[in-house]
Amino acid sequence: ATTMPGKDGLVLYFRTFRSLEWGKNLKAGFEMRVFDKAFGLRIMAPPFAFFEYAVRMHRNRFGKDKSTVWVLCEPKQREHFTVARIVRELGAQLFRANDKLGARAWQADWLFLRSAQHAAVAPSTFGWWAVFLGNAERIYFP
């Protein structure tokens, strides 16, 4: 059985649009730019301060010892410096329960995020629809 966030848990959904394979994508011409004519200003990934604020507000409400803070992201994005800092400085747990599901892991991740009553979500339709349809009590969005 997969662990769910619980009524007092906070799920931090991290997504970056900057590939960890920077050089490879840059050479191929696929790197998204911070500003382009078609889309305007883009945010590549929410800053650490956004997640720090959400965790601080959540812990002020529920207490540090009474709630678990989870980080949900694609396995390849777990190496991102913001994710590492969230785990190290905020004591969040990386959510890995769905890793062994292979190609269907994204569906289980979506259900985990959808079940969250409290979530801080990176700009992403995946994350936004999951928390919106899940009827979360509190949603933090940059």
Image (spheres, rainbow, N blue to C red):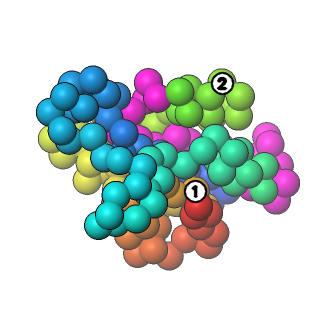
| Local secondary structure at mark 1 | strand
Q: Nearer the viewer, residue 47 or 91?
A: 47
Residue 121: within the magenta? no
Look at label 2 and name its amino acid: Arg
* Image position, residue 138 (x, y; %): 63, 69
First in sequence, mark 1 or 2: give its number: 2
Stretch of the chain drawn in magenta: 58-80
Residue 76: within the magenta? yes
Mark 1 is surrounded, within 10 Å at the Cα level, by few (under 14), some (14 to 19) or many (20 or more) other residues, namely many
Quadrant location of residue 120? bottom right
Identify the residue under disc 2.
Answer: 88
Look at label 1 and name its amino acid: Ala
Left or right relative to 65: residue 20: left
* Image position, residue 74 (x, y; %): 34, 38
Q: Split into 4 quadrants, where in the image is the N terminus?
A: top left
Q: Residue furthest front?
A: 37
Left or right relative to 136: residue 99: left
Mark 2 is surrounded, within 10 Å at the Cα level, by few (under 14), some (14 to 19) or many (20 or more) other residues, namely few
User: What separation in Å lies between label 1 and label 2 (alpha carbons)?
Assistant: 18 Å
Instruction: Determine if residue 16 is in view.
Output: yes
* Image position, residue 54 (x, y; %): 69, 54
Vertical placement of 85 versus 56: above or below? above
Please tell me which residue is depicted at 45% across the width and 74% down the height of the picture.
132
Please tell me which residue is depicted at 25% across the width and 53% down the height of the picture.
107
Identify the residue under disc 1.
Answer: 120
Please tell me which residue is depicted at 51% across the width and 57% down the height of the picture.
121
